[in-house]
Image (tube, rainbow, N blue to C red):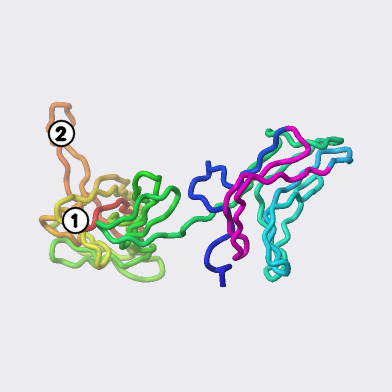
Amino acid sequence: MARRFNSDGVHSEDTSSTVLKVSGSGAASVTVAPGMATVNGFFYHLDATKTLAVPANLGGSARIDLVVLRADQSANAVTAAYKTGGTTAPTLTQVEDGVWEIPLAQCTVAAGSTVVTAANVADRRYFTSRGILPSLSGARPPSVKNTLMVEGTDVYVGDGVDWKWLASVGIKDFTYTPIWYAETTLINWGSGPDFMNIGRVQVVNKRVDLTIQLIPTGNPASVNAPLQVSLPPGLPSNSSLRGLFKWTFTSSNGEGSAVGIGMIFPTESTTRIARLRYPTSAGNSISDPINSQSLFNNRPFDIRSGDVLTIDGSYWLA
């Protein structure tokens, strides 16, 4: 049962801690600092510095060893041990109902040597802590370094001083079928195997990322009103902020291409992209006033079979 209570590792929220850290000093031994750990469900407590002997390397090349914590179920004990390897580090023994090892350090012993220097000790400790802390808004526990806290649908990480927002629950990406309008008139773009009318959506916290792509197979009658398209169902925009999108149109009927900006006007609708605007002016002179016009289904392009209209952007939820 205890194996499921906590993951393997030394007990510390701070990776700079010296808890059970292994040190070498150019002697024929290494030292393990005091500390506590969990090894395969066993609790280990070292209350004083422990010295481990380093066997001499009699080979002709450097030897890579490990310092491990070894839980032995038959002995009902956990010990710190020095485990020799070869040109590569030895394999950890991990038999759940027998001997289970986790690493503390990797030590390199030069050919013909019996010593381990500080530079030849690499920290290999696993760390484990309290796991994820649940919290009530307004009643947070003190910040714990490198620990996650869940508050409602928000996730925070502790830095030891404060809780920093990390992420919030969103909605996994999905698709929907956009509905096209010209004010109150529904626009039917056709059907068939070459037809495409798809919206792809992903929600992260309060931000909605949206891509809409239309490839008509028909040519609806002209409607003298700006082209509009529905937002994802159940995800209306914030009523105070305009959402902005870039759009691009490419004609396969010899009418060229264009780019522009799509806009949500919350005062008009929080469930539609209400305008697809493109830049224009009253003439060609630099003194002519600049302006923008709305895209209609037949103006300035006759949007029809084979054309491609793509809208991409994001907006804030209410």
Residue at the image point whose x is 13% and y is 26% from the top: 287
Residue at the image point whose x is 68% and y is 63% from the top: 77
For marks 1 and 2, give the one nearer the viewer. Answer: 1
Q: Is residue 32 located in the magenta-colored stretch of the structure?
A: yes
Q: Position of residue 7 (x, y in %)?
A: 55, 61
Q: Position of residue 311 (x, y in %)?
A: 30, 53
Q: Position of residue 185 (x, y in %)?
A: 15, 66
Crowd rating for badge 2 (residues with CA inside 10 Å; few <14, some 14–19, many 20+): few
Residue 200, by quadrant, is bottom left
Residue at the image point whose x is 49% and y is 55% from the top: 129
State the predominant SS element of the stretch in magenta.
strand
Vertical side of 153 occupied by 166: above or below:
above
Residue 270, by quadrant, is bottom left
- Say whether residue 210 is visible: no
Identify the secondary structure beneath mark 1: loop
Count of marks overlaid on the render: 2
User: The disc labelled 2 sits on which kind of residue?
Assistant: Gly
**Where does label 2 land, which residue?**
283
Q: Which residues are magenta?
A: 26-55
Q: CA distance from mark 1 to mark 2?
A: 37 Å
Label ID, residue 238: 1
57 left or right of 11 in image: right
